[in-house]
Protein backbone atom coordinates (compact mmCIF):
# COMPACT_ATOMS: atom_id res chain seq x y z
CA UNK A 1 0.00 0.00 0.00
CA UNK A 2 1.44 3.39 -0.91
CA UNK A 3 0.69 7.06 -0.60
CA UNK A 4 -1.68 8.05 -3.41
CA UNK A 5 -0.27 11.50 -4.08
CA UNK A 6 3.34 10.65 -4.78
CA UNK A 7 5.63 8.03 -6.30
CA UNK A 8 8.32 6.70 -4.02
CA UNK A 9 11.87 7.34 -5.15
CA UNK A 10 13.60 4.18 -6.37
CA UNK A 11 16.73 3.21 -4.48
CA UNK A 12 19.12 0.32 -4.08
CA UNK A 13 18.19 -2.34 -1.54
CA UNK A 14 20.62 -2.53 1.37
CA UNK A 15 20.49 -5.42 3.84
CA UNK A 16 20.95 -4.66 7.54
CA UNK A 17 20.84 -8.04 9.19
CA UNK A 18 17.48 -9.55 8.22
CA UNK A 19 15.96 -6.12 7.47
CA UNK A 20 16.06 -4.52 4.02
CA UNK A 21 16.27 -0.76 3.60
CA UNK A 22 15.29 0.64 0.21
CA UNK A 23 14.40 -1.26 -2.94
CA UNK A 24 10.85 -2.56 -2.73
CA UNK A 25 10.91 -2.83 1.07
CA UNK A 26 8.50 -0.74 3.15
CA UNK A 27 9.83 2.31 4.97
CA UNK A 28 11.46 0.98 8.14
CA UNK A 29 11.35 2.46 11.63
CA UNK A 30 14.46 3.11 13.69
CA UNK A 31 15.20 4.45 17.14
CA UNK A 32 18.20 4.72 19.42
CA UNK A 33 18.69 3.58 22.99
CA UNK A 34 19.55 6.19 25.61
CA UNK A 35 21.02 3.72 28.10
CA UNK A 36 24.73 3.21 28.64
CA UNK A 37 25.47 0.47 26.12
CA UNK A 38 28.03 -1.06 28.50
CA UNK A 39 25.07 -1.75 30.78
CA UNK A 40 24.11 -4.71 28.63
CA UNK A 41 21.13 -5.82 30.73
CA UNK A 42 19.61 -2.32 30.88
CA UNK A 43 20.22 -1.74 27.19
CA UNK A 44 18.69 -5.08 26.23
CA UNK A 45 15.61 -4.26 28.30
CA UNK A 46 15.16 -0.99 26.40
CA UNK A 47 15.77 -2.66 23.04
CA UNK A 48 13.01 -5.14 23.80
CA UNK A 49 10.64 -2.31 24.71
CA UNK A 50 11.45 -0.61 21.41
CA UNK A 51 10.89 -3.80 19.43
CA UNK A 52 7.59 -4.40 21.22
CA UNK A 53 6.52 -0.88 20.23
CA UNK A 54 7.31 -1.62 16.56
CA UNK A 55 10.95 -0.62 16.11
CA UNK A 56 12.69 -2.57 13.35
CA UNK A 57 16.28 -1.32 13.66
CA UNK A 58 17.93 -0.13 16.88
CA UNK A 59 21.01 2.07 17.13
CA UNK A 60 23.25 2.04 20.19
CA UNK A 61 26.02 4.44 21.15
CA UNK A 62 29.53 2.97 21.19
CA UNK A 63 31.75 5.56 22.91
CA UNK A 64 34.26 3.10 24.38
CA UNK A 65 35.60 -0.44 24.21
CA UNK A 66 33.34 -1.62 27.03
CA UNK A 67 30.30 -0.60 24.97
CA UNK A 68 31.68 -2.33 21.89
CA UNK A 69 32.23 -5.49 23.93
CA UNK A 70 28.59 -5.45 25.04
CA UNK A 71 27.45 -5.63 21.41
CA UNK A 72 28.18 -9.36 21.19
CA UNK A 73 25.64 -10.09 23.92
CA UNK A 74 23.13 -7.52 22.64
CA UNK A 75 23.30 -8.72 19.03
CA UNK A 76 22.75 -12.31 20.12
CA UNK A 77 19.85 -11.58 22.48
CA UNK A 78 17.94 -8.66 20.95
CA UNK A 79 16.45 -10.36 17.88
CA UNK A 80 16.70 -7.10 15.93
CA UNK A 81 19.60 -5.76 13.82
CA UNK A 82 21.78 -3.37 15.80
CA UNK A 83 23.51 -0.26 14.48
CA UNK A 84 26.67 0.94 16.19
CA UNK A 85 26.91 4.72 16.46
CA UNK A 86 30.57 5.73 16.12
CA UNK A 87 32.28 9.08 16.52
CA UNK A 88 35.98 10.02 16.53
CA UNK A 89 37.51 6.58 17.21
CA UNK A 90 37.43 4.33 14.12
CA UNK A 91 38.78 1.41 16.16
CA UNK A 92 35.42 1.21 17.90
CA UNK A 93 33.77 0.68 14.51
CA UNK A 94 36.11 -2.23 13.81
CA UNK A 95 35.36 -3.75 17.22
CA UNK A 96 31.61 -3.29 16.69
CA UNK A 97 31.76 -5.18 13.40
CA UNK A 98 33.61 -8.03 15.09
CA UNK A 99 30.93 -8.20 17.77
CA UNK A 100 27.92 -8.39 15.49
CA UNK A 101 26.83 -4.88 14.52
CA UNK A 102 24.73 -5.10 11.34
CA UNK A 103 25.44 -1.51 10.38
CA UNK A 104 27.87 1.21 11.40
CA UNK A 105 26.69 4.78 11.57
CA UNK A 106 29.52 7.23 11.13
CA UNK A 107 29.95 10.89 10.44
CA UNK A 108 32.97 10.59 8.14
CA UNK A 109 34.11 14.09 9.01
CA UNK A 110 35.14 13.06 12.50
CA UNK A 111 36.78 9.65 12.02
CA UNK A 112 40.14 10.80 10.69
CA UNK A 113 40.17 10.94 6.91
CA UNK A 114 39.23 9.11 3.73
CA UNK A 115 41.78 6.31 4.20
CA UNK A 116 40.06 5.21 7.39
CA UNK A 117 36.69 5.30 5.64
CA UNK A 118 38.04 2.97 2.94
CA UNK A 119 39.41 0.57 5.55
CA UNK A 120 36.07 0.60 7.39
CA UNK A 121 34.26 -0.21 4.14
CA UNK A 122 36.64 -3.14 3.56
CA UNK A 123 35.93 -4.54 7.01
CA UNK A 124 32.19 -3.95 6.72
CA UNK A 125 32.14 -5.86 3.44
CA UNK A 126 33.95 -8.73 5.10
CA UNK A 127 31.41 -8.78 7.93
CA UNK A 128 28.40 -8.46 5.62
CA UNK A 129 27.46 -5.18 7.28
CA UNK A 130 26.22 -1.85 5.93
CA UNK A 131 27.37 1.71 6.55
CA UNK A 132 25.36 4.85 7.13
CA UNK A 133 27.03 8.02 6.00
CA UNK A 134 25.46 10.41 8.48
CA UNK A 135 26.22 14.02 7.64
CA UNK A 136 25.05 16.47 10.31
CA UNK A 137 24.86 20.25 10.13
CA UNK A 138 26.63 20.49 13.48
CA UNK A 139 29.78 18.71 12.35
CA UNK A 140 30.42 19.79 8.77
CA UNK A 141 33.95 20.23 7.48
CA UNK A 142 35.31 23.72 8.11
CA UNK A 143 36.12 24.16 4.43
CA UNK A 144 32.46 23.64 3.49
CA UNK A 145 31.22 25.95 6.23
CA UNK A 146 33.50 28.65 4.83
CA UNK A 147 32.58 27.94 1.21
CA UNK A 148 28.82 28.10 1.79
CA UNK A 149 28.73 30.55 4.67
CA UNK A 150 27.26 28.05 7.11
CA UNK A 151 25.62 24.66 7.39
CA UNK A 152 23.42 25.05 4.32
CA UNK A 153 21.68 22.32 2.36
CA UNK A 154 24.23 22.50 -0.50
CA UNK A 155 27.03 22.14 2.06
CA UNK A 156 25.44 19.00 3.51
CA UNK A 157 25.01 17.52 0.05
CA UNK A 158 28.57 18.26 -1.05
CA UNK A 159 29.91 16.68 2.13
CA UNK A 160 27.94 13.48 1.58
CA UNK A 161 28.80 13.30 -2.12
CA UNK A 162 32.51 13.47 -1.39
CA UNK A 163 32.40 10.53 1.00
CA UNK A 164 30.17 8.53 -1.31
CA UNK A 165 32.66 9.03 -4.12
CA UNK A 166 35.37 7.58 -1.85
CA UNK A 167 33.24 4.52 -1.08
CA UNK A 168 32.33 4.00 -4.73
CA UNK A 169 36.00 4.04 -5.72
CA UNK A 170 36.55 1.40 -3.04
CA UNK A 171 33.76 -0.71 -4.58
CA UNK A 172 31.46 -0.50 -1.55
CA UNK A 173 27.73 0.10 -2.15
CA UNK A 174 25.91 -1.16 0.97
CA UNK A 175 25.37 2.42 2.01
CA UNK A 176 22.51 4.37 3.58
CA UNK A 177 22.75 8.17 3.59
CA UNK A 178 21.39 10.83 5.93
CA UNK A 179 21.65 14.63 5.81
CA UNK A 180 20.30 16.02 9.05
CA UNK A 181 19.92 19.45 10.58
CA UNK A 182 17.91 20.71 13.52
CA UNK A 183 16.39 23.22 11.10
CA UNK A 184 13.46 21.60 9.29
CA UNK A 185 13.68 23.70 6.12
CA UNK A 186 17.41 22.99 5.70
CA UNK A 187 16.80 19.29 6.24
CA UNK A 188 14.02 19.11 3.65
CA UNK A 189 16.05 21.08 1.09
CA UNK A 190 19.12 18.87 1.55
CA UNK A 191 17.21 15.62 1.05
CA UNK A 192 15.41 17.01 -1.98
CA UNK A 193 18.74 17.94 -3.54
CA UNK A 194 20.49 14.63 -2.98
CA UNK A 195 17.49 12.42 -3.81
CA UNK A 196 18.06 12.89 -7.54
CA UNK A 197 21.84 12.54 -7.36
CA UNK A 198 22.40 9.15 -5.75
CA UNK A 199 20.86 5.65 -5.90
CA UNK A 200 21.36 4.83 -2.22
CA UNK A 201 18.53 4.56 0.31
CA UNK A 202 17.92 7.60 2.48
CA UNK A 203 17.55 7.65 6.25
CA UNK A 204 15.37 10.70 6.97
CA UNK A 205 14.89 12.62 10.18
CA UNK A 206 15.31 16.00 11.85
CA UNK A 207 18.20 15.86 14.30
CA UNK A 208 18.02 17.34 17.80
CA UNK A 209 14.33 18.04 17.24
CA UNK A 210 13.63 18.75 20.91
CA UNK A 211 11.24 17.55 23.63
CA UNK A 212 8.19 15.40 23.03
CA UNK A 213 5.65 17.98 21.87
CA UNK A 214 7.77 20.38 19.80
CA UNK A 215 10.05 17.57 18.61
CA UNK A 216 7.06 15.58 17.39
CA UNK A 217 5.88 18.57 15.38
CA UNK A 218 9.30 19.20 13.83
CA UNK A 219 9.79 15.52 13.06
CA UNK A 220 6.32 15.12 11.60
CA UNK A 221 6.69 18.17 9.37
CA UNK A 222 10.19 17.32 8.16
CA UNK A 223 9.82 13.57 7.79
CA UNK A 224 6.22 13.77 6.62
CA UNK A 225 7.00 16.31 3.91
CA UNK A 226 9.80 14.18 2.50
CA UNK A 227 7.85 10.92 2.66
CA UNK A 228 4.88 12.58 0.97
CA UNK A 229 7.24 13.47 -1.88
CA UNK A 230 8.46 9.88 -2.11
CA UNK A 231 11.79 10.58 -0.40
CA UNK A 232 12.89 8.27 2.40
CA UNK A 233 13.50 4.58 2.99
CA UNK A 234 13.95 4.49 6.77
CA UNK A 235 13.05 7.03 9.47
CA UNK A 236 13.98 8.05 12.96
CA UNK A 237 12.05 10.65 14.93
CA UNK A 238 14.64 12.24 17.25
CA UNK A 239 13.08 13.25 20.58
CA UNK A 240 14.35 14.24 24.00
CA UNK A 241 12.01 11.64 25.48
CA UNK A 242 11.60 7.94 26.05
CA UNK A 243 12.74 6.42 22.72
CA UNK A 244 9.55 4.37 22.63
CA UNK A 245 7.82 7.68 21.87
CA UNK A 246 10.01 8.00 18.76
CA UNK A 247 8.65 4.70 17.49
CA UNK A 248 5.06 5.67 18.30
CA UNK A 249 5.35 8.95 16.37
CA UNK A 250 7.12 7.30 13.42
CA UNK A 251 4.36 4.71 13.11
CA UNK A 252 1.72 7.44 13.13
CA UNK A 253 3.53 9.41 10.42
CA UNK A 254 3.76 6.33 8.20
CA UNK A 255 0.16 5.34 8.82
CA UNK A 256 -1.41 8.73 8.08
CA UNK A 257 0.56 8.80 4.81
CA UNK A 258 -0.76 5.29 4.02
CA UNK A 259 2.77 3.96 3.72
CA UNK A 260 2.33 1.38 6.48
CA UNK A 261 -0.62 -0.06 8.40
CA UNK A 262 -0.22 -0.76 12.09
CA UNK A 263 -3.72 -0.76 13.57
CA UNK A 264 -6.87 1.33 14.01
CA UNK A 265 -6.92 5.00 13.10
CA UNK A 266 -8.94 7.17 15.49
CA UNK A 267 -10.59 10.31 14.17
CA UNK A 268 -12.55 12.70 16.40
CA UNK A 269 -14.06 16.15 16.12
CA UNK A 270 -12.22 19.08 17.70
CA UNK A 271 -15.30 20.01 19.85
CA UNK A 272 -17.19 23.28 19.74
CA UNK A 273 -20.17 24.98 21.36
CA UNK A 274 -22.59 22.44 19.84
CA UNK A 275 -21.01 19.61 21.85
CA UNK A 276 -23.44 18.40 24.56
CA UNK A 277 -21.07 16.04 26.36
CA UNK A 278 -17.53 16.14 27.65
CA UNK A 279 -16.05 14.60 24.52
CA UNK A 280 -12.35 14.53 25.37
CA UNK A 281 -12.59 11.85 28.11
CA UNK A 282 -14.77 9.76 25.75
CA UNK A 283 -12.15 10.01 23.00
CA UNK A 284 -9.41 8.98 25.45
CA UNK A 285 -11.40 5.96 26.62
CA UNK A 286 -12.06 4.82 23.07
CA UNK A 287 -8.34 5.26 22.30
CA UNK A 288 -7.51 2.94 25.21
CA UNK A 289 -10.17 0.48 24.04
CA UNK A 290 -8.74 0.10 20.53
CA UNK A 291 -5.05 0.18 21.51
CA UNK A 292 -4.67 -3.60 21.50
CA UNK A 293 -6.16 -4.16 18.07
CA UNK A 294 -3.98 -4.48 14.96
CA UNK A 295 -6.46 -4.35 12.10
CA UNK A 296 -6.22 -1.12 10.07
CA UNK A 297 -9.79 0.10 10.59
CA UNK A 298 -11.03 3.66 11.00
CA UNK A 299 -12.80 4.56 14.26
CA UNK A 300 -14.69 7.85 14.77
CA UNK A 301 -15.81 9.64 17.93
CA UNK A 302 -18.03 12.65 17.26
CA UNK A 303 -19.71 15.08 19.61
CA UNK A 304 -22.88 16.15 17.79
CA UNK A 305 -25.14 15.46 14.82
CA UNK A 306 -23.17 17.81 12.52
CA UNK A 307 -19.99 15.75 12.88
CA UNK A 308 -21.79 12.44 13.19
CA UNK A 309 -22.43 9.80 10.52
CA UNK A 310 -22.37 12.41 7.75
CA UNK A 311 -18.85 13.78 8.08
CA UNK A 312 -17.48 10.50 9.44
CA UNK A 313 -19.29 8.20 7.02
CA UNK A 314 -15.99 6.64 5.93
CA UNK A 315 -15.43 5.27 9.46
CA UNK A 316 -15.73 1.51 9.88
CA UNK A 317 -17.26 2.15 13.31
CA UNK A 318 -18.19 5.37 15.05
CA UNK A 319 -19.95 7.09 17.92
CA UNK A 320 -21.97 10.29 17.77
CA UNK A 321 -22.71 11.24 21.36
CA UNK A 322 -25.46 13.52 22.68
CA UNK A 323 -26.62 14.66 26.12
CA UNK A 324 -29.23 11.93 26.60
CA UNK A 325 -28.65 9.51 23.74
CA UNK A 326 -25.95 8.60 21.31
CA UNK A 327 -25.73 6.59 18.14
CA UNK A 328 -23.28 4.01 16.90
CA UNK A 329 -22.79 3.86 13.16
CA UNK A 330 -20.95 1.90 10.50
CA UNK A 331 -19.98 3.50 7.21
CA UNK A 332 -22.49 6.27 7.84
CA UNK A 333 -25.39 3.92 8.68
CA UNK A 334 -26.82 3.96 12.22
CA UNK A 335 -26.72 0.50 13.80
CA UNK A 336 -27.69 1.35 17.40
CA UNK A 337 -29.20 4.16 19.45
CA UNK A 338 -28.35 3.98 23.15
CA UNK A 339 -28.47 6.07 26.31
CA UNK A 340 -25.37 8.20 26.80
CA UNK A 341 -24.41 6.37 29.97
CA UNK A 342 -24.36 3.12 27.96
CA UNK A 343 -22.55 4.40 24.90
CA UNK A 344 -19.10 3.01 25.76
CA UNK A 345 -20.47 -0.42 26.67
CA UNK A 346 -22.44 -0.58 23.43
CA UNK A 347 -19.47 0.63 21.42
CA UNK A 348 -17.27 -2.07 22.92
CA UNK A 349 -19.79 -4.71 21.89
CA UNK A 350 -19.85 -3.40 18.33
CA UNK A 351 -16.08 -3.16 18.29
CA UNK A 352 -15.76 -6.84 19.21
CA UNK A 353 -18.32 -7.71 16.56
CA UNK A 354 -16.41 -5.70 13.94
CA UNK A 355 -13.13 -7.49 14.63
CA UNK A 356 -14.80 -10.90 14.82
CA UNK A 357 -16.13 -10.32 11.34
Image (cartoon, rainbow, N blue to C red):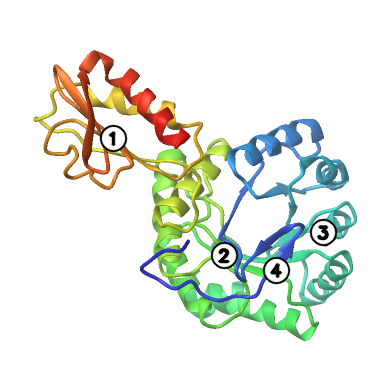
Mark 4 or mark 3: whose residue is earlier in sequence: 4
Q: Which residue is mark 1?
A: 318
Mark 3 or mark 1: whose residue is earlier in sequence: 3
Quarter of the image that includes the C terminus = top left
Q: Quadrant of residue 92?
A: bottom right
In front: label 2 or label 1:
1
Circle 4/circle 3 CB separation < 8 Å: no
Place of residue 24 in the rendered image (x, y in percent of width and height, measured from the top left): 60, 69
In front: label 4 or label 3:
4
Front in this rendered view, residue 37 or 6? 6
Is residue 145 shown to the viewer in this render? no
Q: Which residue is mark 2?
A: 233
Looking at the rendered structure, which numbered label has been put on residue 14? 4
Q: Residue furthest left?
A: 274
Front in this rendered view, residue 116 or 144? 116
Label 4 to label 3, Cα distance in Å? 19 Å
Place of residue 247 in the rendered image (x, y in percent of width and height, measured from the top left): 55, 44
Label 3 to label 2, Cα distance in Å? 24 Å
In front: label 3 or label 1:
1
Front in this rendered view, residue 197 or 92? 197
Mark 4 or mark 2: whose residue is earlier in sequence: 4
Circle 3/circle 2 CB separation < 8 Å: no
Is residue 334 shown to the viewer in this render? yes
Q: Residue furthest front?
A: 357
Amino acid sequence: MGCEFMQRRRSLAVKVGHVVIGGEAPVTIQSMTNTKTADAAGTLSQIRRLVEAGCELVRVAVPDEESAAALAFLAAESGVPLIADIHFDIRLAYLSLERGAAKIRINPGNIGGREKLVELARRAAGAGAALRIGVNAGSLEKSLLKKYGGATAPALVESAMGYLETLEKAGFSDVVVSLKASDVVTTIEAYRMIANLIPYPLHVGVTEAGPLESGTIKGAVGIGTLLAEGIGDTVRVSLSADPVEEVRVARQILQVLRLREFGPELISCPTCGRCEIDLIPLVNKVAEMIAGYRRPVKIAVMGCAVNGPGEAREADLGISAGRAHGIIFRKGEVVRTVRSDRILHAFQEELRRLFQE
